[in-house]
Image (cartoon, rainbow, N blue to C red):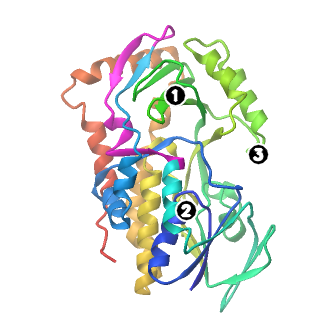
């Protein structure tokens, strides 16, 4: 088949990899002019995640480029460490910067997949024989199947299934992440600082030569396409709040890779309509707070390609449904813990972090996440 995939982040190229192996012709259209950098590091945990990386032959390369992130520390306004939290809570079994994973997947597909960067789909018209697709720049083309792997704000989902607000549930938290300098001289670790309604952090990247700054805060109205407005929102919320916040806010104005979005989930009755299918965050976003999104995308790509290979695409949704819902549930209660809203809640959070290293069930959270990530038996397609 001739298959068009919208989105060149993770889910799209992962799907193209499997489709190429099965002899299909793949095209990926991506709005950005090149592969996107920025965003958080992403992790994989549990046998289901690791087995897909292994089957793709990229596990060793992912390990070679992993972050090697250690424990994360929570600090007070003077930067004094209050408590350390084990790496497995945040980094899974292997963690890698999202941009580096995207590059690995691109290199694994670029010789067989046609990439259309700097373009986007403007309309989709289905008939019995295929889908006519118009683009913002490229000429109209026909495909046998169109896959929307274009994230939380999916264009394909909007064009075929309806407006975003019908499917997207805001969890009440916004996130902003950008690259900056390693101001604290950290080594394979990060620091987090919490005040009522705000959480800020800094963690190392590129073997400690760089860092990512992150800000979590209650949801505010914003223009998704206005980066300067997004920077102004963060600056106004965080100025003068202690720790090294003022330095990070100053760095923000020069950042060219700001990721700013809602922590949200996508809930749909169906991920397909005719010859159009949704994949990854476009279909089932669990929110960045779940820590499961990238693994879910890789597993979803493997299952969709496998069921297409068998000629049973109708099984794609039932195979994944319970697994996806379990992963989504893991992210639903995290928002309040990440951004406590009152001084009392901040104090209780810090107290629990202090106790964590001494509690007999200290590995329970990490083990629960691993169990959720592994709660699917993948067939050998």
Q: Residue at x 52, y 40 (%)?
A: 40
- Tell which of 198 and 344 is nearer to you: 198
Tell me the SS state at disc 1.
loop
- Tell which of 9 and 83 is nearer to you: 9
Residue 1 at x, y = what percent?
A: 56, 86
| Between discs 3 and 2, the one toward the N terminus | 3
| Between discs 1 and 3, the one toward the N terminus | 3
Residue 261 against residue 229 in the figure, above or below: below
The 10 Å Cα crowd at callout 1, few under 14, some 14 to 19, many 20 or more, is many
Marks 1/3 in contact by CB < 8 Å: the verdict is no
Q: CA distance from mark 3 to mark 2?
A: 22 Å
The 10 Å Cα crowd at callout 2, few under 14, some 14 to 19, many 20 or more, is many
Q: CA distance from mark 1 to mark 3?
A: 25 Å
Left or right of residue 131, residue 195 in this image: left
Residue on which the image places disc 3 = 225
State the extent of the magenta-drawn residues as a range.
76-99
| Residue 81 belongs to the span the image colors magenta | yes
Tell me the SS state at disc 3.
loop
Left or right of residue 302, residue 239 in this image: right
| Between discs 2 and 1, the one toward the N terminus | 2
Disc 3 versus disc 2: nearer the observer: 3
Tell me the SS state at disc 2.
helix
Residue 337 at x, y = what percent?
A: 45, 30
Residue 200 against residue 76 in the figure, above or below: below
Residue on which the image places disc 2 = 283
Left or right of residue 361, residue 171 in this image: right
Residue on which the image places disc 1 = 339
Q: Is residue 332 visible?
A: no
């Amino acid at each position: 088949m001739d298959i068009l995939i919208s989105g060149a982040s993770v889910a799209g190229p992962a799907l193209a990899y499997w489709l190429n192996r099965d002899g299909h012709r793949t095209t990926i259209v991506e709005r950005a002019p090149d592969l996107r950098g920025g965003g958080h590091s992403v992790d994989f945990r549990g046998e289901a995640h690791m087995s897909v990386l292994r089957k793709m032959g990229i596990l060793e390369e992912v390990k070679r480029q992993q972050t090697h992130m250690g424990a994360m520390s929570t600090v007070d306004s003077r930067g004094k460490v209050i408590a350390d939290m084990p790496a497995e809570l945040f980094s899974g079994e292997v963690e890698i910067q999202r941009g580096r994973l995207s590059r690995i997947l691109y290199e694994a597909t670029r010789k067989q997949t046609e990439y259309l960067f700097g373009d986007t789909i403007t309309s989709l018209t289905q008939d019995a024989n295929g889908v006519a697709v118009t683009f913002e720049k490229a000429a109209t083309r026909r495909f046998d199947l169109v896959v929307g792997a274009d994230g939380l704000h999916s264009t394909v989902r909007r064009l075929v299934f309806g407006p975003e607000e019908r499917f997207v549930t805001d969890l009440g938290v916004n996130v902003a992440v950008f690259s900056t300098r390693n101001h604290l001289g950290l080594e394979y670790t990060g620091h987090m600082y919490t005040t009522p309604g705000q959480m800020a952090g800094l963690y190392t990247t590129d073997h400690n030569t760089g860092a990512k700054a992150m800000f979590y805060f209650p949801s505010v109205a914003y223009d998704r396409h206005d980066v300067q407005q997004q920077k102004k929102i963060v600056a106004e919320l965080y100025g003068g709040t202690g720790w090294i916040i003022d330095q990070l806010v100053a760095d923000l104005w020069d950042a060219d890779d700001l990721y700013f979005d809602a922590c949200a989930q996508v809930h749909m009755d169906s991920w397909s309509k005719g010859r159009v299918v949704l994949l990854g965050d476009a279909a089932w976003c669990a929110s960045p707070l779940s820590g499961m999104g990238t693994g879910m995308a890789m597993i979803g790509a493997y299952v969709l390609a496998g069921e297409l290979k068998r000629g049973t695409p109708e099984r794609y949704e039932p195979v994944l449904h319970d697994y996806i819902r379990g992963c989504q549930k893991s992210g639903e209660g995290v928002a309040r813990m990440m951004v406590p809203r009152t001084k009392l809640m901040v104090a209780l959070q810090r107290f629990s972090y202090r106790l964590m290293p001494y509690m007999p069930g200290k590995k329970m959270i990490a083990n629960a996440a691993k169990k959720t990530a592994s709660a699917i038996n993948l067939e050998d397609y």
